[in-house]
Image: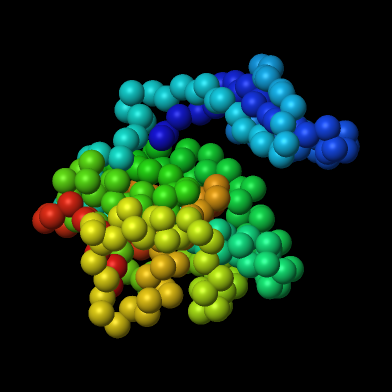
Amino acid sequence: MGGDVLLALNLAVFPDCLPEEAVAEIIRGGADKIKEAGGVIAGGHTVEGPEPLFGMAVLGVAGRAHLWTKGGAQPGDWLLLTKPLGVGIVTTAAKAEAADPTHVAEATRWMSLLNRSASQAARRFAVHACTDITGFSLLGHACEMAFASNAQLELRFSALPFVPGAIDYAKQWLFPAGTANNEKAFRERVRFAPELAEEMRLLLFTPETSGGLLLAMPPEDASALLALPGAPAIWHVGAVSAGEARVCVG
């Protein structure tokens, strides 16, 4: 974390039945995002397969002072989150044709938003630890940070941001299969406030796609980042404390 993109290689699998215009749009979309991130497409590799798969191998560079890892969070640090949660459950509801189109559009907007501006803004201050929130969910990646830092992460549920529709779909139990996998893998390291409903607990175990950054920063630096003119959307969602390496949600 804390680096910049230099170049990327496309890695793609496309079936014969996929229209050429669809293939072109997939590759164009990836190229547009790499350009937005300040890098270039240097080539790639494409093979035929039964279902479309697309990804990238990305090479970047980070200054030693900005090479952020999951370890290093210190007691007293504030926890900041740079994107709202819930895109995983919104897309699952969309697959079941149970999602409001406006919810899908907003989730897509957040998924397509790069973390570049948030990362660049945070580099102006001290960052003790950082992780991105993706398939292992907020709690899974927070557990990794807690374990790597040998510290306790305390999250305030009321402070967590969610994309529109996420709470409603959780109440309808429209969770993807990955939610149960994450809950099984990380539940022993998580403690919840007794009053937090089961579906809200599971929402925090739900996989995210292109999620935000979870930053552990000294309070004075975190406050300065939050007050930075023109800064991207950032939420103060908790703090780090001394204690057992785990995550507490209150």
Q: Quadrant of the N terminus?
A: top left
Res. 206 visible in picture: yes
Question: Which residue is situated farthest in the top direction here?
Answer: 42
- Looking at the picture, tell me which residue is in the foreground, 12 or 71: 12
Q: Is residue 26 left or right of residue 54?
A: right
**Residue 178 higher or lower than 94, as above or below:** above
Residue drawn 56% across the image and 74% down it: 169
- Give the quarter of the image for residue 7: top right
Q: Residue at x 66, y 25 (%)?
A: 10
Q: Could you tell me which quadrant the C terminus lies in?
A: bottom left
Q: What's the residue at 42%, 50% (across, down)? A: 136
Is any atom of residue 121 visible in this view?
no
Residue 28, image x, y percentages: 77, 33
| Residue sitting farthest toward the left | 243
Q: Nearer the viewer, residue 169 or 117?
A: 169
Q: Is residue 87 above or below residue 195?
A: above
Task: Name the residue at 52% across, 66% down.
Answer: 175
